[in-house]
Image (cartoon, coloured by chain):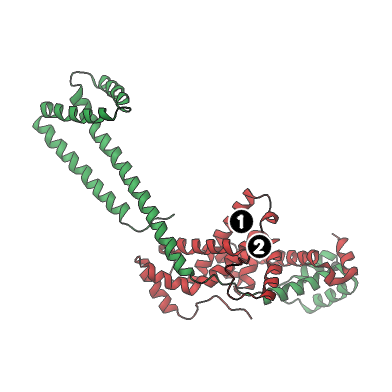
């Protein structure tokens, strides 16, 4: 299936880098960035929907993490801590954006910047990305983060709860709600997939 | 069982108990909407499982280094300004009582304050006035200040210097503050 959070498996080296970074060694922190940039960037990308915002958010995440490294509990997972900073930052950005832009619909869709193509994007992949990104966009920011952590990062309910500062039961109900919302959006966006009968059935809800 | 009950079951994370599963299958036979929803959810799940990880452009950590240095420089500038402003304020607080005492030795305190404020307002537009003010203060100091006062003045000056050095160390050479 999908890769789990990058950088697992070298906990001792990771801890050494964290301790050096705590003493102000920014180069040790750069090693940690090399290890986790993909995890953080992917989360930001899935949350914000375009490469430019994802880059800014990921950069900001690592700056914040370096500045507040003292607050990191070394008994816990560094990846979870980083992703928590990234998720909260992205959620804030989306909320701010909602206040300035009238609706998320007005925000341009994914841009695969022509001069700076994403390393592993091919034409067919782009279509998939766009489709999944369109679906994610229909979710609220917290539901979106929950779905991304669950499906891309294979996080458990407990890990998601910890990352997003939610209770486990809140995570469960958010996931459940998000699944239904995603399916509904899929039906709305691609009704032809399911033929005329299903669509008619869908259009007359029996609530 | 109502339609809502089955719709809930369509998106359950854990497998359903066999009897509920049976009821659900039965309902799906007769309900177009639930069937469409289930098919949509299956498609969505496939899409979610196929979705790739997106990587940043090459040179991400180098760009981070540049951001970090830039932020550091900005923070350094802000701290330098802060230290300067706090010290200017301290210096003014320190100088005011002596100025009042020396400039208007015969007036009551409140009167000295009023005159000082008036003079100060007049000084603001005159760059020249500031140097005149300093010269006057020092000339007057030399005449009026008693040896005991000179000692206390020295002690106060040393105190401010120590505070200043401590602040300079704490704010200017410490780690980058939270931003
Ligand atoms: Zn139904």
Residue at horizontal 61%, vertical 56%?
A: A94
Image spot of residue B126 (x, y percent): 30, 27
**Number of marks in the rendered image:** 2
Category of crowding for the residue at label 2, using alpha-carbon neighbours closer than 10 angstroms: few (below 14), some (14–19), many (at least 20) = many
Point out residue A58 in the picture as x, y percentages from the top left corner.
52, 64
Indicate whether B150 appears above or below A147. above
Q: Quadrant of residue A114?
A: bottom right
Q: Which residue is mark 1?
A: A94
- What chain is colored red? A
The residue depicted at 41 percent of the width and 79 percent of the height is A12
B142 left or right of B81? Answer: left
Q: Mark 1 or mark 2: which comes first in sequence?
A: 1
Q: Secondary structure at mark 1?
A: helix
Q: Which labelled disc corresponds to residue A143?
A: 2
Chain B: what color?
A: green
Q: Is residue B95 visible?
A: yes
Q: Is residue A68 visible?
A: no
Point out residue B73 in the picture as x, y percentages from the top left corner: 37, 56
- Marks 1 and 2, Cα distance to the nearest angstrom? 12 Å
Quadrant field for ligand 1: bottom right
> In the rendering, which numbered label is found on residue B101?
none
Q: Is residue A54 left or right of residue B44?
A: left
* Residue closer to the observer: A114 or B160: A114
């Amino acid at each position: 299936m999908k890769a789990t959070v990058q950088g697992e498996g070298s906990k001792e080296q990771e801890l050494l880098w964290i301790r050096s970074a705590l003493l102000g060694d920014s180069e040790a922190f750069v090693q940690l960035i090399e290890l986790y940039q993909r995890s953080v960037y992917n989360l930001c990308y899935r949350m914000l929907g375009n490469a430019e915002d994802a880059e800014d958010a990921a950069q900001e995440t690592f700056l914040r993490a370096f500045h507040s490294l003292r607050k990191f509990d070394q008994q816990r997972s560094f990846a979870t801590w980083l992703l928590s900073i990234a998720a909260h930052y992205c959620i804030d950005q989306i909320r701010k954006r909602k206040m300035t832009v009238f609706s998320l619909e007005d925000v341009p869709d994914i841009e695969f910047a022509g001069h700076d193509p994403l390393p592993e994007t091919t034409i067919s992949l782009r279509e998939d990305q766009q489709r999944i990104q369109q679906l994610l966009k229909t979710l609220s920011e917290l539901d979106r983060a929950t779905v991304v952590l669950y499906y891309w990062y294979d996080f458990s309910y407990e890990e998601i709860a910890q990352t997003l500062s939610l209770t486990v039961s809140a995570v469960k109900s958010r996931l459940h709600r998000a699944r239904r919302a995603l399916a509904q959006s899929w039906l709305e966006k691609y009704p032809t997939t399911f033929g005329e009968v299903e669509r008619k059935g869908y259009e007359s809800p029996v609530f | 069982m109502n339609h809502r009950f089955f719709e809930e079951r369509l998106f359950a994370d854990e497998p359903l108990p066999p009897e509920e599963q049976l009821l659900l299958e039965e309902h799906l036979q007769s309900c177009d909407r639930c069937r469409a929803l289930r098919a949509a959810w299956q498609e969505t799940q496939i899409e979610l499982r196929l979705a790739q990880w997106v990587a940043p452009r090459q040179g991400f950590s180098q760009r981070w280094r540049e951001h970090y240095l830039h932020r550091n420089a900005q923070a350094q500038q802000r701290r330098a300004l802060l230290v300067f402003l706090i010290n200017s304020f301290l210096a003014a607080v320190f100088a005011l009582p002596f100025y009042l005492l020396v400039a208007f030795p015969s007036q009551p305190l409140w009167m000295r304050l009023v005159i000082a404020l008036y003079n100060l307002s007049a000084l603001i537009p005159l760059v020249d006035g500031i140097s005149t003010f300093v010269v006057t203060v020092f000339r007057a100091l030399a005449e009026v200040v008693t040896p005991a006062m000179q000692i206390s003045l020295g002690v106060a000056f040393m105190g401010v210097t120590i505070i200043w050095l401590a602040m300079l160390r704490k704010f200017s050479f410490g780690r980058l503050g939270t931003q």
